Structures are given as structure tokens and as C-alpha cells.
Image (cartoon, rainbow, N blue to C red):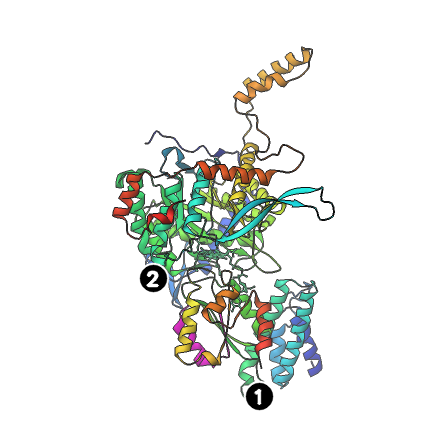
Amino acid sequence: MVADELIREIKTNVVMGRVDSSDEGYDGKMEGKPGVSELVRDAIKQDISGKRLIDALSEAMVTVGEKYDSGEYLIPDMLAGAESVGTAMDILEPHLIHSDVKSKGTFVIATVEGDLHDIGKNIVATLLKGAGYNVKDLGAGISAEKIVEAVKEYNAEFVGLSALLTTTMIKMASVIELMESEGLRSKVKVLIGGAPTSPDFAKKIGADAHCRDAFEAIDILRDITP
Amino acid sequence: MNDGTFRAGTLVAPTFRLSEEQIRILHDSSLRVLNDLGITCFNEEAVSLFEEAGCITAISDGENAWNIRIPEKVVMEAIESAPSRIVLGAPDWANRLILDSREARVYFGTGSETNIFLDTEIADFVCTTDSSITMRHPIYKEKRGTILRLCESARLCDSLPNVDFFIRNVNIQDEGISVSNKDINVFFASLLYTAKHVQAGLVDISSLDNVVRLGEIIAGGTASFQDNPLISFIACLIKSPLQMVEDTTQKVIEISRRGLPLVISSSPQGGSTAPIQEEGMVSLINAEILAGITLTQLVNPGTPALYGAVPVRARLDTLHDFYGAPEFIHYNIDCVEMARFYNIPCYSTAGVGDSKVPGIQATVEKLFSQLAVAQSGAQYIHYAFGLLDRTNIFCPVQAILDDAHISLVREILRPPIVNEEVTEASIVEIRKVTASSTRLFARHIRKQMRRGLVSQPYGLEGEGDRDEALENACAKLKEIQETAEKQLSDEVIDEIYKKIAGVLPKDNFEL
Ligand code: B12
């Protein structure tokens, strides 16, 4: 496939939500044809620039977003698109180190200590990855120390904390306190979410924003990213 | 005292959704999941127990976990040793429950740990375009869950005739509550206001012995508690797909070691943490519950463990849990049938509204599952009272509505009594009436009423031409609030305060 054609195919496959060739795609007829993983690997072989690929992925994701907004796509379709972009980014990452391509920022995300609920956190991680953030998902039940360690290690600009239990949401405050005592707080924006949390709670513990869902997180990030 | 009585529940003639062959296919596929894929276990003690029983274990790379592959033989032996009949006690002996897998006796109870308590008030409204038109309509106020609201819920549920057991349904978020004293205060608040069986999950394993001691005091001693286990536990040790979490698995081990009744529950969400299609969901949840039950039997053969099925579907717009879905009913019925196949009593799920307030939507979402899951013969149906907003809200007025609706469900499921004798009597009746001048059967209703076979109109029916169900439910709630009392005597309460640590001062529980 020539470069232009490959780029077009990558976009189509993101919109179809096809991580790889085993996926049948939105219209259910595409199983066996190369998916985003295969196509991106091909593109790397052909030396198509990282910037061009990332632009294509974001453009395709904008189309997915529009289809979701218009009601044509539901969350499963949206997540399939975002997962495809996430997979593409994982494949591209080692090739981007020496290029001038910059991600929208590094976002460390975790469910706090004592809490194992991670469905919401995983959705947020997938969609943020699809939106072009470099997402480091630490998992669920993660201590304040580990979260702060990761913020340092990845030099993260954003931290996302999730909690679904009234007994664990208070652990979000511990993470913020620890960041403060380590002198990191002013460098990082903290977003929180999960059913028992609220804008008031975010204010109380000194978080930068509370997000009802992943879409609100994307909007807020767009506003606060320089 | 033990006069051999139990709550009657509703004995139904179960209807089947799966054929014998389909049950066999699902059973085989769950066994394949357990044997070929195995479960990921984060609890080291459980790993040793599985290993000793002959399972293949291996360290899961990167994680502090093990992969355990459980062969058929180990699962089948556990199923054999799990009791098929479990008695759950109650402070009032007449409230005891008998759960027998060979009998489709259905009990309904509460459930969830809601953060929001929804108060209802009826207010008068005037039409803005024609002030001669007025109406009465409920106004709802969301309140935080507290100890007092849990007490209020326990008192209400004690009074509702169709509530067979009480699972703590309000999350207590008072200032003085911490992880270490939450469990004891949950059980105390519940048992203070209901004499029905009380069940809850444990937040902190170190509370277990304290909670059991509370049960023993109320039962009248250690031996009486063994005869009459008036409390039991829910352990959601599985995180789907196929993970056994560290701390809840430890709780299962400790509770099983003491031989106390417990629910082994799994709650996969079809479309997010489990396949959305029925056969995929049931293969998975069944494998997960069997793994949990196997663990209970490895710890202590004969541990009374319920097959705890909470399969839920995810919504397509948010991936939130979704209870009004027909698939929710399919999943749950299938699990009831799988549990029956294994001869293990089933803890099942029905009656949650996705709607945030009582009304037509909530009623539709609740009623189909309450009827259909009960019809399948689930022994123990939780979540059935007062739950709205996908288990996040408990609304007392909704619980009263649910009680009225479940009363109808019970009537609907009353099995037929058709035999030569009664049918002959009916022929005689038809002959008499046909020959009479009135040609009315009305007089003969009385005999059937005495047999308890004639149902009443909807319990919350209004008098006028308006729908007054909500108003009547509010009035009923007021009545219960004014008359219901504590269920523990002052002596028992004093003994509890003397012997049990961590119970908050008495004024926290005064309604
Ligand atoms: C699924 C579920 C489980 C699953 C979790 C599976 C998993 N992989 O996460 C299982 C069965 C394992 C489970 C276990 C337990 N659960 Co649970 N669980 C739920 C349930 C039904 C749904 C939660 C969910 O996933 N929602 C779907 C997602 C999409 O929504 P979400 O999490 O809110 O996320 C969205 C937003 O909030 C936001 N968001 C969330 N996090 C973040 C983070 C950031 C950075 C941002 C930007 C946004 C954001 O964006 C997300 C996407 O839109 C809720 C009840 C309910 N109806 O909410 C109970 C619930 C949360 N669980 C509850 C409880 C009590 C438990 C248990 C203690 C056991 C029990 N039921 O007895 C254990 C706890 C284990 C532990 N230590 O954590 C209670 C909590 C009450 C309380 N005490 O506060 C609830 C409310 C149920 C209830 N009413 O009783 N649970």
C-alpha cells in the first residue's frame, strides 16, 4: 500500500474500531483484513513520519467523537476507536523518542488504596489515551506513595484519581498531601472522579477538578492545558 | 425458642429457561474456564489450599498474584461437600429461613449499601394555567446514609410482611465511623430494630469475632448461636473476570474456618467485566462462584455457602450497571438453574430500579425481575426492596411499594392445586349455580377465601379516580414510624455495651 492509502486505511480502521485483524469492525464485515495494529506496523516500515501518523489517528478519533455526539455511536464504539488509537500509540511509542512529536501530556491514573473498583478508571484511561494523552495506568488499590513515585518517574503533568467507596475516597487527600510535602503539587493538575466524589469534595481536599465522566475530563484538560 | 417454625416464603413450581443439555454445556464450559484459564489469586493462603488439593498454581508475572488452574475433580468434590440445605437463624425463631436447593421456596430481602437515603413528602400543587386544578405529588429529598437511617430502614423492614431477611442497605457515613468500627455498628443498628435474619459484608476482617460475639449475646449464648445463626456474611471475593482479591478472600477463609454461613458472590457486569451474551456471562460467573465455593470447602468441608449470583448488564451509553435490562433477568435465571444443578441454595438478585425516583419507570424495571427471578425458584432474592438509581439509593416509600408488589408476585406464583377432589367440588358448585335463579358464583367465593386462595386488590389502591399509590405508601410509612419498636431488650442492650467494644454511644441509635 502506498503511504496515502495506508493513512486512509488507518483512519477508516480507527473509525471502525479495529484494534487488529481479528476484529470484525463497526459494520461487522471486516474480520481478517489488516487492522490498526497491522497497518501502523506497516507504516513504520515504510518510514511514514510519527507526526503524520499521530495526526491521522487524532483526526479519526475526532470523527469517532462526532459520531458519538450525533448518537450514531455508543460507548462500545467509542471505546473500540479509543482502544485502537491506544494500541497504535503503544506500537509507535519507541519510534517517537527521537522525533519532535509531543503527546498532549503524561497522565498518571489510579484507583486509590483499598479500592478495587476500576471500570470507570479504565474507561477514562482508554478515552484519554485515544485523545492523545500519554496515559500511565497504575491499576487499582494503589497507595499514595506509589502514585507519587510514578508522578516523579514519568514527570507527569496530570494525575487522575478514582474511588468508588466512601471509606476510600479520603485516600485521595493523602495523595495530594504527599505531593505537597514532596514539592510536586504545583507542577501537577489533579483530577478526581468516581460516584461518591463531588466538586465540593474536590475543593475540600484541594484537587484541581472533579469529573463526572471521561468526557468532562477531556474538556477540562483541554481548558487547563497550555 | 425453637418450635421448628420457619418463615413460609413462597413455594413455587419453578419454570425453566435452560434445557438440561444447555445446563450441561454451561457447566462444561465453566469447568474449562477453571481448568484451562484458571483464576488469578491475590491471596497466598488460598493458593496453598488450592495447591494442596491438587490444583496447578504458578506465579503470575509482574503481579503479586498466582494463576490457579482448578481441575474438574477438585470442583466436583467441593460441590459434593457443600451443604444443599442451609438454615439461617433469626432473633425471633419464627423468622428463621430454610434454604433447600431441592425446594423452590423463595425468600425476598433487602440489599446493597446505599450512600443516599431518599425521603419522600407529598405536597399540593396548583396548575399554572388553571388554578382550579390541583394535584398531590411527591417531593424527594436526598439525604446521606447514616446510622440513624440504617436504624430507620431496619425498623421499616421488620414491619414489612414480605421482607424475609435484612441485608444492611444503608451505608453509614457518620463522623464517628471508621473502617475498624463500621461492621459492629452496622450489625448492632440492624439487630436493634429487626428480629429478622441480618446479613452484611465485612469491611474489616478483625471485626469478625466481635460481630459473632454480638450474635451470640442476642442468640442467648454460643451454643444457641450455633443452632440459630441469626447473622451471616456476604463475601464478594471475585473481581471479574476471574480474579480472587486478597482481602475478601482472607475473609472467606476466616468465616469458613468458623463454619459460619456465608454468600460467595460474584457480580460481573455484562459488557464491561464479562461478556454481554448470556452464554458467555453464565460460563464466567458460574466458574467464578464455583471457584469461591471450592475454597470454602477446602478450608472447612461442610461450610454453609450460598451460590451468590449478582450478574448485571452494562448500559451502552455509559457502561454503568443496568438492572431493568431483560438480559439481567436471563443471566439471573440461568444462575438459579446452575445452582440447582449443583444442589446449592441460590442467593439471587432482582428488583433494582435504574430510575432515581419511584414511579412508572421504577416499577417496570423492578417488577419484571421480581416476578421472573422468583418464578425460577431462587431461594434467596436480595436487592428486592427500596433500591433505586442502580443500587445507589434506598427509598423507604419505594420499599413499601415493593412490599405491595411482591405480595402480588407471591400470589401470582402460588402453585395450582388441581386434584380429583377439588375439581369434583367445583363441578358440584357449577351444577348448583347453574340451577339457581341468580346464576352468580359470589356466595361460593367465601369458601375459597377461607382456603386462602383469593387475592386482594393492589394494597396501595386509592379511593378516588386518582392514582394514590405513592400517597398511600407515604401514609403507611408514617404509621410504621409511629408504632414500630426496638427489638432488643434493655438487658440485652446493656450486656452488649458491657461486652462488645466499638459500639457507638446509645444516642446514635435512638430514633
Ligand atoms: C461494578 C461494581 C463492583 C465490582 C467492581 C469491578 C471492577 N472491576 O471495578 C465488584 C463486584 C468487584 C465490586 C466490589 C465491591 N463493591 Co462495588 N460496585 C460496583 C457498581 C455496581 C458499579 C461501579 C461501576 O463500575 N460503575 C460503572 C463506571 C463506568 O462508573 P464509575 O465508576 O462511576 O466511573 C465513571 C465516573 O465516575 C468517572 N470517573 C471515575 N473515576 C474517575 C477518575 C478520574 C480521574 C476521572 C477523570 C473520572 C472518573 O468516569 C467514569 C466513566 O464515566 C457500584 C454500584 C453503582 N451502581 O455504582 C458498586 C458499589 C460502588 N460497590 C460497593 C461495595 C460496597 C462494594 C464491596 C465492598 C462489596 C460489596 N458489594 O459488598 C466491594 C469492594 C471491593 C473493594 N475493596 O474495592 C458500594 C459502595 C458503597 C460504599 N461503601 O461507598 C456500591 C455503591 C454498591 C452499593 N450500592 O452497595 N463492586
Find the magenta span and give its range: A142-160
Where's residue B158, x and y in %? Answer: 43, 38
The magenta stretch spans residue A156? yes
Q: Is residue A121 above or below residue B371?
A: below
Please report, as a chain letter, where disc 1 is located: A
Q: Residues within 10 Å of mark 1 (few under 14, many from 20)?
A: few
Where's residue B172, x and y in %? Answer: 42, 53
Q: Residues within 10 Å of mark 2 (few under 14, many from 20)?
A: some
Q: Looking at the figure, which quarter contains the N terminus of chain B?
A: top left
Which residue extends farthest front? B131
Task: Please name the residue that numbered disc 2 is placed on.
Answer: B44
Where's residue B469, x and y in %? Answer: 60, 38
Q: Secondary structure at mark 2?
A: helix
Query: Image check: B321 left or right of B485?
Result: right
Task: For marks 1 and 2, give the one nearer the viewer.
Answer: 1
Where's residue A133, x and y in %? Answer: 56, 77
Please report, as a chain letter, where disc 2 is located: B
The image quadrant that residue A149 belongs to is bottom left
Task: Please name the residue that numbered disc 1 is placed on.
Answer: A99
Q: Secondary structure at mark 1?
A: loop
Residue at the image position 31 percent from the left and 40 percent from the top: B218
Amino acid type for the residue under numbered disc 1? Ser
Q: Is residue A159 above or below residue B473?
A: below
Query: Image check: B236 left or right of A83?
Result: left
Q: Looking at the figure, which quarter contains the C terminus of chain B?
A: top left
Residue at the image position 59 percent from the left and 41 percent from the top: B470
Q: Is mark 2 within 8 Å of ligand 1?
A: no
Q: Which mark is residue A71?
A: none
